[in-house]
Image (cartoon, rainbow, N blue to C red):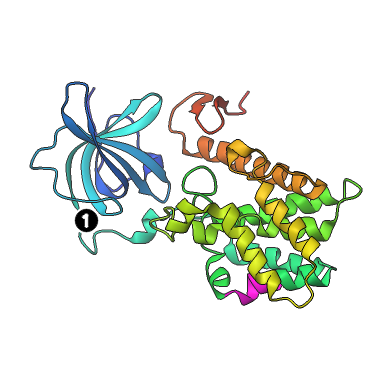
Protein backbone atom coordinates (compact mmCIF):
# COMPACT_ATOMS: atom_id res chain seq x y z
CA UNK A 1 0.00 0.00 0.00
CA UNK A 2 1.34 3.43 -0.90
CA UNK A 3 1.61 5.72 2.13
CA UNK A 4 0.13 9.21 2.07
CA UNK A 5 2.27 11.83 3.80
CA UNK A 6 0.52 13.82 6.53
CA UNK A 7 1.87 17.37 6.29
CA UNK A 8 0.34 18.73 9.51
CA UNK A 9 -0.70 17.49 12.93
CA UNK A 10 -3.82 15.40 12.60
CA UNK A 11 -6.31 14.80 15.38
CA UNK A 12 -6.94 11.15 16.11
CA UNK A 13 -10.47 11.21 14.74
CA UNK A 14 -9.10 12.48 11.38
CA UNK A 15 -6.55 9.72 10.85
CA UNK A 16 -7.06 7.35 7.94
CA UNK A 17 -5.53 4.05 6.95
CA UNK A 18 -2.22 4.38 5.10
CA UNK A 19 -1.29 7.84 6.36
CA UNK A 20 2.24 8.46 7.59
CA UNK A 21 1.80 10.62 10.68
CA UNK A 22 4.37 12.80 12.42
CA UNK A 23 2.87 14.55 15.42
CA UNK A 24 2.59 15.06 19.15
CA UNK A 25 0.26 13.04 21.38
CA UNK A 26 -0.28 12.36 25.07
CA UNK A 27 0.88 8.87 26.07
CA UNK A 28 -1.92 7.65 28.35
CA UNK A 29 -0.47 4.17 28.89
CA UNK A 30 2.71 2.28 28.12
CA UNK A 31 3.08 -1.49 28.38
CA UNK A 32 6.17 -3.56 27.69
CA UNK A 33 4.97 -6.86 26.24
CA UNK A 34 6.42 -9.94 24.55
CA UNK A 35 5.59 -11.13 21.05
CA UNK A 36 5.00 -14.81 20.32
CA UNK A 37 8.62 -14.97 19.23
CA UNK A 38 9.71 -13.63 22.63
CA UNK A 39 10.70 -10.17 21.37
CA UNK A 40 9.86 -7.15 23.54
CA UNK A 41 7.61 -4.43 22.16
CA UNK A 42 5.65 -1.40 23.42
CA UNK A 43 1.86 -1.22 23.43
CA UNK A 44 0.73 2.38 23.86
CA UNK A 45 -2.48 4.36 24.22
CA UNK A 46 -2.18 7.78 22.59
CA UNK A 47 -4.67 10.56 23.28
CA UNK A 48 -5.73 13.95 22.04
CA UNK A 49 -8.96 15.84 22.65
CA UNK A 50 -10.79 13.84 19.95
CA UNK A 51 -10.11 10.36 21.26
CA UNK A 52 -7.72 7.51 21.95
CA UNK A 53 -5.54 5.48 19.59
CA UNK A 54 -3.60 2.22 20.00
CA UNK A 55 0.08 2.48 19.15
CA UNK A 56 2.59 -0.35 18.68
CA UNK A 57 6.39 -0.11 18.69
CA UNK A 58 7.64 -3.40 17.31
CA UNK A 59 11.30 -2.44 16.88
CA UNK A 60 12.87 -0.98 20.05
CA UNK A 61 15.88 0.61 18.36
CA UNK A 62 17.79 3.82 19.05
CA UNK A 63 15.06 5.84 17.30
CA UNK A 64 12.79 5.07 20.29
CA UNK A 65 13.90 7.52 22.98
CA UNK A 66 13.08 7.32 26.69
CA UNK A 67 9.55 8.35 27.75
CA UNK A 68 6.94 7.48 30.39
CA UNK A 69 3.18 7.32 30.77
CA UNK A 70 1.51 10.76 30.76
CA UNK A 71 4.40 12.29 28.81
CA UNK A 72 3.70 14.27 25.66
CA UNK A 73 5.59 12.48 22.89
CA UNK A 74 6.38 13.09 19.23
CA UNK A 75 5.74 10.00 17.14
CA UNK A 76 6.45 9.02 13.55
CA UNK A 77 4.42 6.12 12.26
CA UNK A 78 1.89 4.69 9.84
CA UNK A 79 -1.83 4.26 10.43
CA UNK A 80 -3.33 0.84 9.79
CA UNK A 81 -6.63 -0.87 10.59
CA UNK A 82 -6.51 -3.83 12.99
CA UNK A 83 -9.67 -5.63 14.15
CA UNK A 84 -11.72 -2.85 12.55
CA UNK A 85 -9.97 -0.20 14.68
CA UNK A 86 -7.26 2.31 13.69
CA UNK A 87 -3.78 1.69 15.07
CA UNK A 88 -0.44 3.37 14.49
CA UNK A 89 2.72 1.40 13.80
CA UNK A 90 5.42 3.64 15.32
CA UNK A 91 9.01 3.90 14.04
CA UNK A 92 10.29 6.91 16.02
CA UNK A 93 9.49 8.44 19.42
CA UNK A 94 10.92 11.24 21.51
CA UNK A 95 9.56 13.42 24.30
CA UNK A 96 7.85 16.57 23.07
CA UNK A 97 9.59 19.83 23.86
CA UNK A 98 7.92 22.73 25.62
CA UNK A 99 6.26 24.98 23.07
CA UNK A 100 5.79 22.20 20.52
CA UNK A 101 2.25 21.46 21.68
CA UNK A 102 -0.76 23.08 23.33
CA UNK A 103 -1.93 20.97 26.32
CA UNK A 104 -5.56 21.90 25.64
CA UNK A 105 -5.34 20.02 22.32
CA UNK A 106 -4.97 16.82 24.34
CA UNK A 107 -7.76 17.23 26.86
CA UNK A 108 -11.13 15.98 25.59
CA UNK A 109 -13.95 18.23 26.75
CA UNK A 110 -17.72 18.49 26.61
CA UNK A 111 -19.26 20.20 23.61
CA UNK A 112 -21.82 21.82 25.91
CA UNK A 113 -21.48 25.06 27.84
CA UNK A 114 -20.37 24.22 31.39
CA UNK A 115 -21.64 27.51 32.84
CA UNK A 116 -25.12 26.86 31.44
CA UNK A 117 -25.12 23.26 32.67
CA UNK A 118 -23.95 24.31 36.14
CA UNK A 119 -26.66 26.97 36.35
CA UNK A 120 -29.33 24.40 35.41
CA UNK A 121 -28.03 21.84 37.91
CA UNK A 122 -27.76 24.26 40.82
CA UNK A 123 -31.18 25.64 39.89
CA UNK A 124 -32.72 22.33 40.95
CA UNK A 125 -31.85 23.16 44.56
CA UNK A 126 -34.42 25.97 44.51
CA UNK A 127 -37.13 23.47 43.51
CA UNK A 128 -36.59 21.36 46.66
CA UNK A 129 -39.22 21.77 49.40
CA UNK A 130 -37.66 19.65 52.16
CA UNK A 131 -35.46 21.96 54.22
CA UNK A 132 -32.99 19.23 55.20
CA UNK A 133 -32.46 18.06 51.63
CA UNK A 134 -32.03 21.64 50.45
CA UNK A 135 -29.46 22.32 53.18
CA UNK A 136 -27.60 19.12 52.27
CA UNK A 137 -27.36 20.10 48.61
CA UNK A 138 -26.23 23.63 49.44
CA UNK A 139 -23.63 22.24 51.83
CA UNK A 140 -22.12 19.93 49.22
CA UNK A 141 -22.49 21.88 45.97
CA UNK A 142 -21.94 25.41 47.23
CA UNK A 143 -20.18 25.34 50.61
CA UNK A 144 -17.76 22.49 49.87
CA UNK A 145 -14.88 24.35 48.19
CA UNK A 146 -13.39 21.23 46.57
CA UNK A 147 -16.71 20.25 44.98
CA UNK A 148 -17.45 23.81 43.90
CA UNK A 149 -14.01 24.13 42.30
CA UNK A 150 -14.15 20.80 40.43
CA UNK A 151 -17.76 20.06 39.48
CA UNK A 152 -17.52 21.92 36.15
CA UNK A 153 -14.27 20.35 34.96
CA UNK A 154 -14.18 16.79 36.27
CA UNK A 155 -14.77 13.71 34.15
CA UNK A 156 -17.36 11.03 34.91
CA UNK A 157 -15.09 8.10 33.98
CA UNK A 158 -11.68 7.12 32.69
CA UNK A 159 -12.90 5.73 29.38
CA UNK A 160 -16.40 4.19 29.45
CA UNK A 161 -18.67 7.24 29.16
CA UNK A 162 -18.41 11.00 29.70
CA UNK A 163 -14.65 10.54 30.16
CA UNK A 164 -13.77 14.12 29.35
CA UNK A 165 -13.50 17.61 30.83
CA UNK A 166 -16.98 18.55 32.05
CA UNK A 167 -18.24 14.99 31.67
CA UNK A 168 -19.26 14.64 35.31
CA UNK A 169 -21.39 17.78 35.17
CA UNK A 170 -22.95 16.77 31.83
CA UNK A 171 -23.81 13.28 33.11
CA UNK A 172 -25.09 14.53 36.48
CA UNK A 173 -27.37 17.10 34.85
CA UNK A 174 -28.67 14.55 32.35
CA UNK A 175 -29.49 12.01 35.07
CA UNK A 176 -31.15 14.73 37.16
CA UNK A 177 -33.31 15.83 34.21
CA UNK A 178 -34.34 12.24 33.50
CA UNK A 179 -35.24 11.69 37.16
CA UNK A 180 -37.20 14.94 37.24
CA UNK A 181 -39.21 13.72 34.25
CA UNK A 182 -39.74 10.29 35.80
CA UNK A 183 -40.79 11.70 39.18
CA UNK A 184 -44.06 12.99 37.74
CA UNK A 185 -44.92 9.78 35.92
CA UNK A 186 -45.35 7.47 38.91
CA UNK A 187 -47.15 7.86 42.21
CA UNK A 188 -45.38 7.35 45.52
CA UNK A 189 -42.18 8.92 44.20
CA UNK A 190 -40.63 11.44 46.59
CA UNK A 191 -39.38 14.03 44.08
CA UNK A 192 -37.18 15.88 46.58
CA UNK A 193 -35.41 12.66 47.50
CA UNK A 194 -35.03 11.54 43.90
CA UNK A 195 -33.64 14.87 42.66
CA UNK A 196 -31.24 15.02 45.60
CA UNK A 197 -29.91 11.53 44.89
CA UNK A 198 -29.63 12.21 41.15
CA UNK A 199 -27.52 15.28 41.84
CA UNK A 200 -25.32 13.38 44.31
CA UNK A 201 -25.10 9.91 42.78
CA UNK A 202 -21.60 10.38 41.27
CA UNK A 203 -20.29 13.16 43.49
CA UNK A 204 -17.60 10.82 44.85
CA UNK A 205 -15.92 10.81 41.43
CA UNK A 206 -14.37 14.17 42.30
CA UNK A 207 -12.16 12.19 44.69
CA UNK A 208 -12.13 8.89 42.77
CA UNK A 209 -10.45 10.33 39.64
CA UNK A 210 -7.53 12.72 39.34
CA UNK A 211 -7.66 15.90 37.28
CA UNK A 212 -6.86 16.13 33.58
CA UNK A 213 -4.70 15.45 31.71
CA UNK A 214 -4.00 12.39 33.92
CA UNK A 215 -7.64 11.37 34.68
CA UNK A 216 -6.57 8.19 36.51
CA UNK A 217 -7.86 6.53 39.67
CA UNK A 218 -6.58 8.04 42.91
CA UNK A 219 -5.61 5.85 45.88
CA UNK A 220 -9.08 6.38 47.39
CA UNK A 221 -10.58 5.67 43.98
CA UNK A 222 -8.82 2.32 43.89
CA UNK A 223 -9.38 1.45 47.55
CA UNK A 224 -12.90 2.78 48.11
CA UNK A 225 -14.54 3.81 44.82
CA UNK A 226 -16.92 6.68 44.17
CA UNK A 227 -19.97 4.91 45.59
CA UNK A 228 -18.47 4.56 49.08
CA UNK A 229 -16.80 7.98 48.87
CA UNK A 230 -20.14 9.57 47.94
CA UNK A 231 -21.96 7.90 50.83
CA UNK A 232 -19.27 9.16 53.23
CA UNK A 233 -19.58 12.69 51.85
CA UNK A 234 -23.34 12.62 52.44
CA UNK A 235 -22.89 11.33 56.00
CA UNK A 236 -20.30 14.01 56.80
CA UNK A 237 -22.46 16.81 55.38
CA UNK A 238 -25.67 15.56 57.05
CA UNK A 239 -23.95 15.25 60.43
CA UNK A 240 -23.25 19.01 60.38
CA UNK A 241 -26.90 19.93 59.74
CA UNK A 242 -28.80 20.37 62.99
CA UNK A 243 -31.64 17.85 63.31
CA UNK A 244 -31.01 16.06 60.02
CA UNK A 245 -33.26 12.95 60.18
CA UNK A 246 -31.32 9.69 60.39
CA UNK A 247 -33.96 7.90 58.31
CA UNK A 248 -33.63 10.48 55.53
CA UNK A 249 -29.85 10.11 55.55
CA UNK A 250 -30.21 6.33 55.19
CA UNK A 251 -32.66 6.69 52.27
CA UNK A 252 -30.29 9.06 50.45
CA UNK A 253 -27.24 6.86 51.07
CA UNK A 254 -29.16 3.80 49.92
CA UNK A 255 -29.76 5.43 46.53
CA UNK A 256 -26.04 6.18 46.22
CA UNK A 257 -24.98 2.70 47.32
CA UNK A 258 -27.38 0.95 44.93
CA UNK A 259 -27.28 3.14 41.83
CA UNK A 260 -25.20 0.69 39.77
CA UNK A 261 -28.10 -1.69 40.15
CA UNK A 262 -26.34 -5.04 40.54
CA UNK A 263 -23.68 -6.50 42.83
CA UNK A 264 -21.48 -7.45 39.87
CA UNK A 265 -21.46 -3.83 38.69
CA UNK A 266 -20.12 -2.53 42.00
CA UNK A 267 -23.25 -1.74 44.00
CA UNK A 268 -23.00 -3.02 47.59
CA UNK A 269 -26.83 -2.98 47.70
CA UNK A 270 -29.63 -3.60 45.21
CA UNK A 271 -32.19 -0.79 44.70
CA UNK A 272 -34.93 -1.31 47.30
CA UNK A 273 -36.95 1.90 47.02
CA UNK A 274 -38.78 3.36 44.05
CA UNK A 275 -36.41 6.36 44.03
CA UNK A 276 -33.33 4.10 44.07
CA UNK A 277 -34.68 2.05 41.17
CA UNK A 278 -35.52 5.11 39.06
CA UNK A 279 -32.05 6.54 39.75
CA UNK A 280 -30.39 3.30 38.68
CA UNK A 281 -32.39 3.20 35.44
CA UNK A 282 -31.66 6.85 34.65
CA UNK A 283 -27.95 6.46 35.35
CA UNK A 284 -27.71 3.25 33.33
CA UNK A 285 -29.59 4.72 30.37
CA UNK A 286 -27.56 7.91 30.19
CA UNK A 287 -24.25 6.06 30.53
CA UNK A 288 -25.02 3.47 27.85
CA UNK A 289 -26.65 5.82 25.34
CA UNK A 290 -23.69 8.19 25.72
CA UNK A 291 -21.32 5.27 25.18
CA UNK A 292 -23.07 4.41 21.91
CA UNK A 293 -22.94 8.07 20.85
CA UNK A 294 -19.19 8.19 21.55
CA UNK A 295 -18.57 4.91 19.69
CA UNK A 296 -20.31 6.27 16.60
CA UNK A 297 -18.65 9.69 16.82
CA UNK A 298 -15.12 8.27 17.07
CA UNK A 299 -15.53 5.51 14.48
CA UNK A 300 -13.34 5.92 11.41
CA UNK A 301 -14.52 2.95 9.38
CA UNK A 302 -16.93 3.11 6.46
CA UNK A 303 -20.27 1.35 6.48
CA UNK A 304 -23.19 1.20 8.87
CA UNK A 305 -21.69 -1.19 11.43
CA UNK A 306 -19.12 0.48 13.68
CA UNK A 307 -17.85 -2.64 15.47
CA UNK A 308 -18.09 -4.56 18.71
CA UNK A 309 -18.38 -2.77 22.07
CA UNK A 310 -16.82 -4.61 25.00
CA UNK A 311 -18.78 -2.45 27.44
CA UNK A 312 -22.13 -3.19 25.81
CA UNK A 313 -21.15 -6.69 24.59
CA UNK A 314 -22.66 -6.25 21.14
CA UNK A 315 -22.03 -4.84 17.68
CA UNK A 316 -23.25 -1.28 17.16
CA UNK A 317 -24.95 -0.06 14.00
CA UNK A 318 -25.51 3.49 12.82
CA UNK A 319 -29.18 4.30 12.20
CA UNK A 320 -28.84 4.81 8.46
CA UNK A 321 -31.38 3.53 5.96
Q: Residue furthest left?
A: 62
Residue that label 1 marks: 96
Q: Is residue 294 visible?
A: yes
Q: Which residue corresponds to the image point at 64% horizontal and 62% vertical from the top-left? A: 117
Note whether 194 is above or below 63 in the view shown.
Answer: below
Q: Which residue corresponds to the image point at 92% horizontal and 48% vertical from the top-left? A: 187
Q: Residue furthest right?
A: 187
Give 264 or 123, whichever is nearer the viewer: 264
Note whether 297 is above or below 27 in the view shown.
Answer: above
Q: Which residue corresponds to the image point at 21% horizontal and 56% vertical from the top-left? A: 96
Q: Is residue 111 visible?
A: no
Q: Magenta-highlighted stretch: main secondary structure? A: helix
Residue 140: x %, y % from top left: 64, 70
Q: Which residue corresponds to the image point at 32% horizontal and 61% vertical from the top-left? A: 102
Give 215 or 253, whichever is nearer the viewer: 253
Instruction: Give the quadrant of residue 243.
Output: bottom right
**Crowd around label 1: few <14 · some 14–19 · many ≥20 (10 Å):** some
The C terminus: image quadrant: top right
Residue 234: x %, y % from top left: 66, 64
Could you say whether the residue bearing mark 1 is in a helix, strand or loop? loop
Residue 133 is inside the magenta segment: no
The N terminus: image quadrant: top left
Compared across the picture, whether 229 is left or right of 76 comes to right
Stretch in magenta: 137-144
Residue 291: x %, y % from top left: 56, 39
Note whether 64 is above or below 247 in the view shown.
Answer: above
Q: Residue furthest front?
A: 246
Q: How many marks?
A: 1
Amino acid sequence: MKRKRCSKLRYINELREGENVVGHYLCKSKQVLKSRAGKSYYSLKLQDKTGMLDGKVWDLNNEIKSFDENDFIKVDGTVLIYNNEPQINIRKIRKSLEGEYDPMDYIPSTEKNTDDMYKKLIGYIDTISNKYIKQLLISIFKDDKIVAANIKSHSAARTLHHGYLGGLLEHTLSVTEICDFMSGRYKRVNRDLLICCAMLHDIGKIYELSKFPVNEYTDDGQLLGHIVIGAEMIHDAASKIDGFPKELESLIKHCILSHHGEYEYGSPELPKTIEAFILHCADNMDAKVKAIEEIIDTNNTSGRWVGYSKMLQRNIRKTEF
